[in-house]
Image (spheres, rainbow, N blue to C red):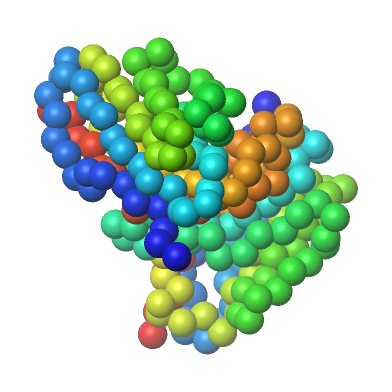
């Protein structure tokens, strides 16, 4: 089955800097890669997603890139703000027809003012 | 549009008891999936329901079960609770079923087993 590795597990940046979180997946049949942000005491919130027929997608300060050949995808946050501090999860759809999501272990991002 | 609603938000149960958690999906969404979140194991898929039928199941023991009603609402049940079942249980809904569907999570139900 699918396996998703996420790095780093913790990331600390200064406000205004960029942050990059990387994930690798094992199943070449996976075709959907969402990113979720989870704040303390809340459920994960979808922030951006990408499908396997696209290499890059941007939404304001957030971008995701996908390299299907290398089986890895990354989240890029530019001009970080203190409110970006949260745990970020990547996920990949299980390559089977059901397509449930397999999640990475999460990255705790801290943005220092 | 209202989001995914889960009840109760917090509960404490004793080992050996059973618990039922409830989930109301986003209006118009027909698929409901459940995930367990723990610090050690992260987010793990429990099962998914679509049109009142379980379509997919994760690697959890039979003590974990669920169902979906005709209005797409869903419940999950855990019987004979163990200490290790303490976790955040997350419900997510999506418009359809199958690979590539975007899922939206609720706030979760925090279960503590003592």
Residue under the image location 56 percent in, 65 percent down: A47
Q: Is residue A113 visible?
A: yes
In the depicted structure, whether residue A22 falls above or below residue B8: below
Name the one closer to the observer, B23 or A105: B23
Q: Quadrant of residue B57?
A: top right
Quarter of the figure with the N terminus of chain A: top right
User: Where is residue A30 drawn, in percent x and y?
Assistant: 75, 40
Q: Is residue A72 left or right of residue B90?
A: right
User: Where is residue B28 drawn, in percent x and y?
Assistant: 52, 52
Name the one closer to the observer, A5 or B56: B56
Q: Quadrant of residue B61?
A: top left
In the depicted structure, whether residue A46 falls above or below residue B76: below
Name the one closer to the observer, B39 or B64: B64
In the depicted structure, whether residue B112 falls above or below residue B29: above
Q: Is residue B108 visible?
A: no
Q: Is residue B9 left or right of residue B39?
A: left
């Amino acid at each position: 089955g699918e396996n998703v590795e996420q790095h780093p597990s913790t990331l600390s940046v200064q406000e205004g800097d960029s942050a990059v979180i990387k994930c690798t997946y094992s199943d070449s049949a996976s075709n959907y890669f969402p990113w979720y942000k989870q704040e303390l005491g809340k459920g994960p919130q979808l922030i951006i997603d990408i499908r396997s027929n696209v290499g890059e997608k941007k939404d304001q300060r957030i971008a995701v890139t996908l390299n299907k050949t290398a089986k890895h995808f990354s989240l890029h946050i530019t001009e970080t703000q203190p409110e970006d501090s949260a745990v970020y999860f990547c996920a990949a759809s299980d390559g089977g027809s059901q397509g449930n999501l397999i999640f990475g272990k999460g990255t705790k991002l801290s943005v220092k003012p | 549009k209202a989001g995914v609603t889960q009840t109760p938000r917090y509960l404490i149960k004793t080992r050996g008891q059973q618990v039922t958690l409830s989930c109301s999906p986003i209006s118009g969404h027909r698929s409901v999936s459940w995930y367990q979140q723990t610090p050690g194991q992260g987010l793990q898929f429990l099962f998914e329901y679509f049109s009142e039928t379980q379509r997919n199941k994760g690697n959890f023991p039979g003590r974990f079960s669920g169902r979906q009603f005709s209005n797409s609402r869903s419940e999950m049940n855990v019987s004979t609770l163990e200490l290790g079942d303490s976790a955040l249980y997350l419900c997510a809904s999506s418009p359809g079923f199958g690979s590539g569907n975007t899922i939206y999570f609720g706030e979760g139900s925090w279960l503590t087993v003592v």
